[in-house]
Image: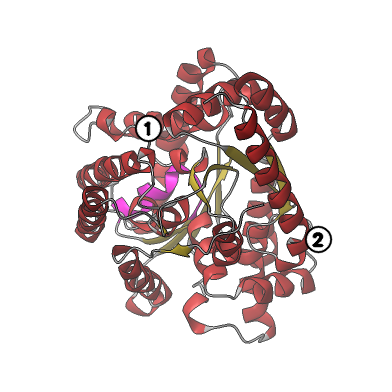
Amino acid sequence: MEQKEYKLNMLHTTMGMGPMVDQHWAELRTAKQRGEKVAWAAGPGFILPYAMKMKCHFMAGYSSYCAGRRCGDQVIEAAESGGDLVDTCSYHKLHTGMFYAIKKGIPIKEEVVLPMPDLMISARLCPEQSHYGEALHQRFGVRVIGIDHPIPRKKEDFPKIEEFVTREHKEILIPVLEEICGKPFDYDELRRILSVLKETALIRNECWEFFKKKPTPWTLWDYGVSLAPVIYMMGKPEGVTYYQKLKAELAERAAKNIPALSPDGEKYRLMWDGWLPWAFLGRIIRKLVRYGALPICGRYPWEFFPHPEAFDPEAEDIIYDLVKQWYSGQEILWHDGPEGAVELNGKLIEEYSIDGIIFFTSKTCRLWMGQQDMMTAIERKYGVPGIIIEGDMVDSRMISDAQIDTRLQALFERIDGIRKRQPF
């Protein structure tokens, strides 16, 4: 296989994300000292505590932060010392492990320590969420509100599910927030937050368009680093400013034809299907770069408010509007099961000129169903090969360099073989 010396051209704007993220976690970490209420959350309900001026963190957001600070393994070991099983969800274990570390005096980096929450909002998107909420409540006395988020299996399911989830937020979550904070729910603040979120996500979507350019000026990993303004910098204008700067840099790169990969752009354009491996982003991108390969799209990023143009912060029923926005992302991820995902990935293959797909399956999360069947169906229907890499988002014990290297080499050899058979 031809080998060329490739170099990744780092974006300047993404380097500014670290200080913004650090500030968010520092404010959360010291919230109790200022007498502020704290919430932990998963699912669309994570926006509502912000409207009550609570400090809040999003479950997956913390997991990516903790893993990125190289603390994941240490916190996971603390969780297992307290009784969590090895194959329990890594996101779950990063939270129970934090409690056990504090309880047992296990030293943890200060910047990833979490304050005890006044409320945990558990969105039951998967079976693990129920165990997660139960563990926090029974073991540590945390107050937990469970909000069910049924996963649709066909488009006709969406209206009923959206109405059901809206009622849960109105009839269960909001009254508890009012009780904890001692004041009525602040709908005006929620609308303000959602106005900023809409503006942020609109610019974010404009940045997505640059993935379609050949060669691409940025990577899916760059976007993963840039998720914070959309998932937990609620209502902060810094998120809008960040994406404005990012868009300007991408536009400049596109105008000057500066690729994300030197010397002359990527050889292989890849789709990444599954969670992002937060603790191993650098490790995996270095393996891909050696082959001239870059991940440029996937289903996961579309989970977070993919259609902000439909967002109406002035909607009469703002909770329903928020839930619909969340489910517009769930439709992309889950609708019609694996069959619908094959259709979606087919569109992405065409729009983003995809050469191959890496299906990342986490050993501690089986929410991404049917990837083996999807891989087979996509290659038959669209002629695009794929591989499955088993690992984890955080736990280094579940990542095998040998497996990744072998399967990547096989993928690129198959792509090369397909190209040789294609007519000029």
| Residue 73, image x, y percentages | 68, 72
Q: Is residue 183 magenta?
A: no
Which secondary structure dominates the residues rendered in magenta?
helix
Q: Is residue 57 left or right of residue 73?
A: left
| Residue 355, image x, y percentages | 56, 37
- Amino acid type at circle 1 is Gln
- Range of residues picked out in magenta: 41-52
Q: Residue at horizontal 22%, vertical 49%?
A: 251
Q: Quadrant of residue 50?
A: bottom left
Q: Is residue 185 left or right of residue 128?
A: left
Q: Is residue 253 left or right of residue 382?
A: left
Viewer can see residue 64: yes
Query: Mark 2 highlights which residue?
Result: 85
Q: Quadrant of residue 102?
A: bottom right
Q: Residue at horizontal 49%, vertical 73%?
A: 115
Q: Residue at horizontal 57%, vertical 16%?
A: 154
Q: Residues within 10 Å of mark 1 (few under 14, many from 20)?
A: many
Total numbered labels placed on residues in the image: 2
Q: Residues within 10 Å of mark 2 (few under 14, many from 20)?
A: few
Residue 325 shows which numbered tag?
1
- Amino acid type at circle 2 is Leu
Q: Nearer the viewer, residue 198 or 386?
A: 386
Viewer can see residue 368: no
Q: Nearer the viewer, residue 270 or 297?
A: 270
Q: Secondary structure at mark 2?
A: loop
Q: Nearer the viewer, residue 34 or 332?
A: 332
| Residue 368, image x, y percentages | 65, 38
